[in-house]
Amino acid sequence: MRLLGIDPGEKRIGLAISDPLGITAQGLAVIHYTTTEEVLAEIIRVCREYEVSRVVIGNPINMSGSKGAASEKAETFAGLLRDKLTIPVVMIDERLTSSSAEKVLISGGVSRKKRKAVKDKIAAVLILETYMALNKPTNREV
């Protein structure tokens, strides 16, 4: 049951993948935006290659809770993926994941040039980790 996390952006799209048990998330790739069809084809290829059972897309909701242009674009992108895939595509609030990813990289001493190359992948990991934490199965006995 692998999950694919996506940090959608206008120039780059970060991807993260879970382990087969859906416990941990690792950065997978950054897709440089070309055309929507090429990006969708690459994501579909990744879903097949890794036998993904669910796609989690970050929704950049404004700090006020309102939906801005970036959120609307992410929702449109999610809709396009839903039309192409037979697996669930869900969205999760991703407020501050990109800035959190930036802070992690800065604290690790990563140069500005290298941060730009991996920030979207780290943001996708944070999106996926958040989703997994919120949807962790409980082991409580009844």
Image: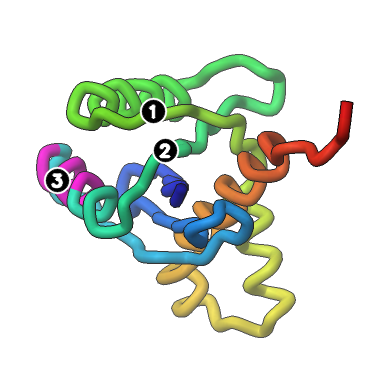
SS class, disc 3: helix
Q: What amino acid is labelled 2 in the image?
A: Arg
- Which residue is more in the foreground, 65 or 128? 128
Q: Residues within 10 Å of mark 2 (few under 14, many from 20)?
A: some
Q: Is residue 33 left or right of residue 93?
A: left
Residue at image mark 2: 54
Residue 72 position (above or below residue 5): above
Q: Residues within 10 Å of mark 3 (few under 14, many from 20)?
A: some
Q: Is residue 124 visible?
A: yes
The residue that mark 1 highlights is 88
Overall secondary structure of the magenta stretch?
helix
Q: Residue at x 21, y 45 (%)?
A: 44
> Is residue 2 placed above or below 54 in the rendered structure?
below
Check the picture and name the quadrant holding the C terminus: top right
Relative side of 39 to 50, left or right:
left
Image location of residue 102, percent across then percent down: 62, 63
Position of 88 compared to 84: left or right? Answer: right
